Image (tube, rainbow, N blue to C red):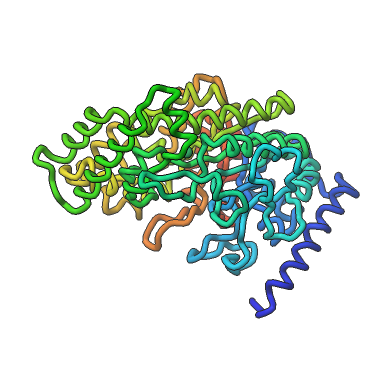
Amino acid sequence: MSTPQRPALIARRDFCAVSAGLAAAMAAPQAFALPLAELKAPAGGRSIGIQIGAVSFVDEGVDKVLDLLADRGAVDTLYLTTFTYGRGLAGRQIPGHPFPDHGLQESDEGTFHGGNYATPHAEFYRDTSLKQTRAPDHGELDIVTAVLPAARARGMRLFCSIEDVFRSDVAGVELLSEVDLQGRRAGTLCLYHPEVRAFWTGLATDLCTSYDIDGILFFNERNGPLLNALGASHAQSIASSRVTCFCEHHRRAAREQGLDVERARRGYTALDKFVQAALNDQRPTDGYFVEFWRLLAEWPEIIAWDRLFDAAKHQVLAEVKAAVKRVRPALQVGFHIEHVNSFNPIFRATRTYADLASKADFLKVVVYNNCGGERYAQFIRNIGSTVFRDVPKEELLRFNSHLLNYGAEAQLDELAKAGLSPDYVDRETRRALAGVKGKCQVLPGIDIGIPTGNESRKASPDDTHAAVAAALRAGADGLILSRKYSEMNLANLSAAGRAVRDSLVR
Ligand SMILES: [Zn+2]
């Protein structure tokens, strides 16, 4: 069903639907409330959350969506996408993938913009150039104001999700962007820039002060220059000459730590040559791995510069947590722990769960198993094209899986189609729980319909049930259904809820 004049109609209808929901929530909070006793502890004290963006409430109505999430998914906590310019957490289904069985069956490619879906209050952004970030997607709608009363009426908690993904046409961004190895401006913002740090603490403080929410879930999936140079993740292209950051703020931070900026630059230039030679099949005399290790030995600044990026990323996490606790100590802060933390032993070595636990009240640990097959295969192909180019990829997969303590998973050429198993969910949940040592909560992120390639695994209700059951059996403190409701089929959401309720009767 579609009409040419759809965009205008949608805008009006969306506004009415959301307003109607809001008015109903204000007028009669108990009128549609489900039995609160049931909702407050649908999972035996474990928190069952879902990631959801503004567009789903606009398209389907606040009350209808909240009732559906509680009924089908046993959801008691919302991670409401409040700030991002990315499509992973906001917007409808990403273009080119089939729509789920709810919401508008129409691409929002032409209307999606991103930004702050709440209302930025100017006093919190005095120390940053990023003052105008209001998302224009839904007119004057403030999604936190629209959803919060209706969530509260149902005994649901609400966290604002904020994500470090920007776009180049945002006012002020060009002044804060990173500088790459060759001196070019990048599309990412420098985490050593004082105005970027002021933006993140300002945004978190604004949301926690201006709304009666439960806290913040902070997403930052960015990697340091070493991994970016190697393309040592599942999604990245290998762009070794574009590594960042060499801006003045980074250079200053390096000098303060006694790091030689020029040697770091030369080290990354040598690494760029190594990567490009490998991609062109020019084997070093002593082999790819030996040459790579030699580079690290000759240019220890390569690793030091990578650690410098991580230090900034972790500093921002710590600053966000401190800012939130200053508003109210009971507010909670969680961090999204990216998928590469699971696949990549080099990345794993750059952080510990114990340290992350000291910075957060909860960690959302990505254990996406369906799309995990496709992603893990891509990771193996990436590192198998440079550092481990001498190793047959099937053997590399098996070797790497041993390093990671993965169990029996599919072979490389079947991995995308097979996905990773519920056993993977179990193992990664237990690893995180053992790592945090009870110092923070572990909420595995469960893959429900995360888009994959045409031939790759698509989550079935049985897959979803098995993944949820595995995470809960492993002892998780709760779950976060991911990545966003606008990608999920309702049968899968129901399967997640069924697994939660099944876990209570065993
Ligand atoms: Zn920088």
Q: Quadrant of residue 194?
A: top right
Left or right: residue 495 versus residue 16 is: left
Q: Height in image: 54 above or below 439? A: below
What residue is at 23 percent from the left and 36 percent from the top? 399
Left or right: residue 346 versus residue 205 is: left
Q: Work out whether residue 68 or residue 284 is closer to the camera in this orientation and state it.
A: 284
Left or right: residue 384 versus residue 307 is: left
Q: Is residue 482 visible?
A: no
What residue is at 74 percent from the left and 72 percent from the top? 9
Q: Position of residue 417 (x, y in %)?
A: 35, 55
Q: Position of residue 121 (x, y in %)?
A: 76, 43
Q: Residue furthest right?
A: 27
Q: Height in image: 178 above or below 63? A: above
Q: Residue furthest bottom?
A: 4
Q: Quadrant of the C terminus?
A: top right
Q: Position of residue 433 (x, y in %)?
A: 48, 26
